[in-house]
Amino acid sequence: MSALLQHLTRAHLPASALRSLYAQFHTSPTFIPDLISALDHLDPDLTHRALSLLTQAARTSPLSLEHLARIADRLDASDHWLHRLTACQLLAAAPLPLELAEDVFPFLQRAFTDHRVIIRAWALTAMLSFRDHPRFRPDVLAALRVARRDPAKSMQARLRQILS
């Protein structure tokens, strides 16, 4: 078991500890592959931890197509709401190549139907990367129409942010 995986399996791991782990491990050449591998080894209720670190990495530098494809294969690894949320945040942070659209878009559509507004908002944010693709444009526009009618202030704030 890698040192990173040992940290990710701890009973209590606050956000500050995740930031510390990122600072400690992000320069390792195996950081991204180790995190992707962790998705297979972590308890489903803890996969959001690896996804959170992957999101931090994606905000710093683009993830490779190979890494994104491996992540896409693991999007349904957990039904936990934090998994869905952090997966949507990762997909919003990582420029998504059209080659992965068929793998990723169905997950985003399901996430957009979640009862939690924050998950719907992040799913919509990630969906927008496909709005210019003819196959997905109608679904993205339909999701935008639904989101515009959403009474939740957080959804409206997210819309203002992503459409500005």
Image (cartoon, helix red, strand yellow):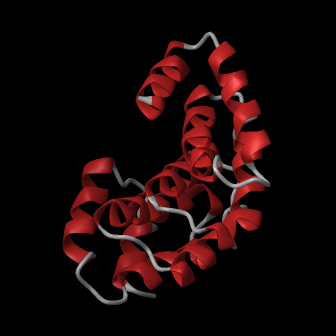
Q: Where is residue 23 in the image (x, y as percent from the top left)?
A: 20, 68
Q: In this view, does 29 lie to the left or right of 130?
A: left
Tell me what residue is drawn at x 36 percent, y 81 percent.
31
Tell me what residue is drawn at x 64 percent, y 52 percent.
130
Residue 22 or residue 1, whichever sits in front: 22
Q: Where is residue 41 in the image (x, y as percent from the top left)?
A: 59, 77
The quarter of the picture where residue 99 lies is bottom right
Can residue 114 be seen in this snapshot?
Answer: no
Can residue 140 be seen in this snapshot?
Answer: yes
Tell me what residue is drawn at x 55 percent, y 62 percent.
47
Q: Point out the image quarter for the C terminus.
A: top left
Q: Point out the image quarter for the N terminus.
A: bottom left
Q: Is residue 23 above or below residue 144?
A: below
Report the number of numbered marks.
Answer: 0
Q: Position of residue 117 (x, y in %)?
A: 60, 26
Q: Position of residue 56 (x, y in %)?
A: 34, 60
Tell me what residue is drawn at x 64 percent, y 61 percent.
44
Q: Residue furthest top?
A: 151
Q: In this view, does 70 lie above or below 158?
A: below
The quarter of the picture where residue 139 lies is top right
Q: Is residue 102 left or right of residue 81?
A: right
Residue 56 or residue 21, whichever sits in front: 56
